[in-house]
Image: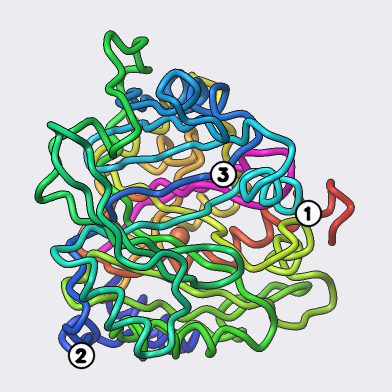
Amino acid sequence: MTETISRAAANQAGARINANAYAEAQDFLPLKGIDHVEFWVGNARQASAYYRALWGFTPVAFSGLETKVRDRASYVMRQNDITFVFSAPLTPDGEIAEHVRAHGDGVHNIAFLVDDVESAWRETTTRGAVSALAPREFDGGEDGTLRRSSVRTYGETLHSFVDRSDYHGAFAPGYRKVKNPARAAQGLSLLEVDHCVGNVELGEMDTFVDFYRDVFGFSQLIHYDDKVIHTDYSALMSKVMTNGNGRIKFPINEPATGRKKSQIQEYLDWYHAPGCQHIALRTEDIVATVRQLRENGVEFLGLPHEYYATLADRVGDVGVPIDTLEELGIEADRDEEGYLLQIFTRPIQDRPTFFFEIIERHGSRGFGVGNFKALFEAIEREQDKRGNL
Ligand code: FE2
């Protein structure tokens, strides 16, 4: 019965799920998954400590002055299939310093693992992508050769293609393995990147939907219009693009006009460009993971008691007592395929820009549309505190 209600609710809300999206995606660009995400930050040493001590990431590789790199320091951090790289500038000018000055800390590169960086670059650039790095081999001596190419996407964000099949070193040539890494926070089980969300300017959502369809061969998984995602004040529109194996899911958001400022517009105003709004990390134990993250000092958005008072009626049994969900601030949503549990952090840097989502999926391939209204009201409360509503 719950499913009937929720399907009716979803239809009424206007969210459209394309069940054949994966099959419709074109295969001229086979992507094996997300290889890593690189953040450009003001202080990479401190960022790496934050992700180690609060989020449970283990330092695996480093490059900087000690590896004869003179313009930047980079720390590679890993947890299961998630690899993050944090890079900071060592000089007052240059691309990282300029990026940090304009945007604050943020996502610079969402890199894909591929078998053929030459083909990936050719297929995308001949379809209209702007090259950021022509296919190149990086010689790692006895560690072998890493191949890489890159193209541009929204704002100043890049997508790199990485082929590691002939490389056996720590991360990439120029990096050295971290021996005896400091102990990472325990009790966390973040498994992989579930999806990466891009915020683009008003009127640009379809430009980037077309870009991922025409240039990357993705297809559209879901469309949420501003009738779905709105409060009394603000609204946004979102379309979700996915690749053929379903491992890459990229929602693209644009602000919609409301009585007050959309949270997407707040992001654009403070990031000073389109960019990555949030990355969702998948876990199979959201309760233990969020409990530990909270103990470690990670801050999450809070939802009011009223959200939980009626939650069981909306989603049925989700395997976790509602009291526990409320205690930890975890949200639940159900669609025709199953359910999901999710939670969102506050922005993780001083600017109200990038944040994380933690997600546990049980059949649902959605993004928690049933939570959007409650969630956006929570975000608006915080926007209001920042004077940005
Ligand atoms: Fe998300």
Indicate left or right for 174 with 101 as reference: left
Question: From the viewer's perspective, is 362 left or right of 105?
Answer: left
Residue 216 visible to the viewer: yes
Q: Dot 2 corresponds to which residue?
A: 24
Between the residue at mark 2 and the residue at mark 1, the CA separation in whole angstroms equals 39 Å
Rendered position, 209 above or below 313: below
Q: Is residue 119 magenta?
A: no
- Residue at 42% over, 28% down: 63
- Depth check, mark 1 against mark 3: the one in front is 3
**SS at mark 1 in the image:** helix
Q: Earlier in the sequence, mark 1 or mark 3?
A: 3
Dot 3: element: strand
For badge 2, the amino acid type reads: Glu
Q: Residues within 10 Å of mark 3 (few under 14, many from 20)?
A: many
The Cα–Cα distance between marks 1 and 3, rounded to whole angstroms, is 25 Å
- CB of mark 1 within 8 Å of CB of mark 3? no
- Badge number at residue 383: 1
In the displayed structure, 299 sits above or below 212; it is: above
Q: Is mark 3 within 8 Å of ligand 1?
A: no
Which is more N-terminal, label 2 or label 3? 2
Q: Left or right? Give the position of 120 relative to 200.
A: left
Numbered marks: total: 3
Residue at 56% across / 44% down in the picture?
40
Quadrant of the image occupied by residue 44: top right
Residue of label 3: 40
Span colored in magenta: 338-358
For the residues labelled 3 and 2, the Cα–Cα distance comes to 34 Å
Mark 3 against mark 2, which lies toward the viewer? 3
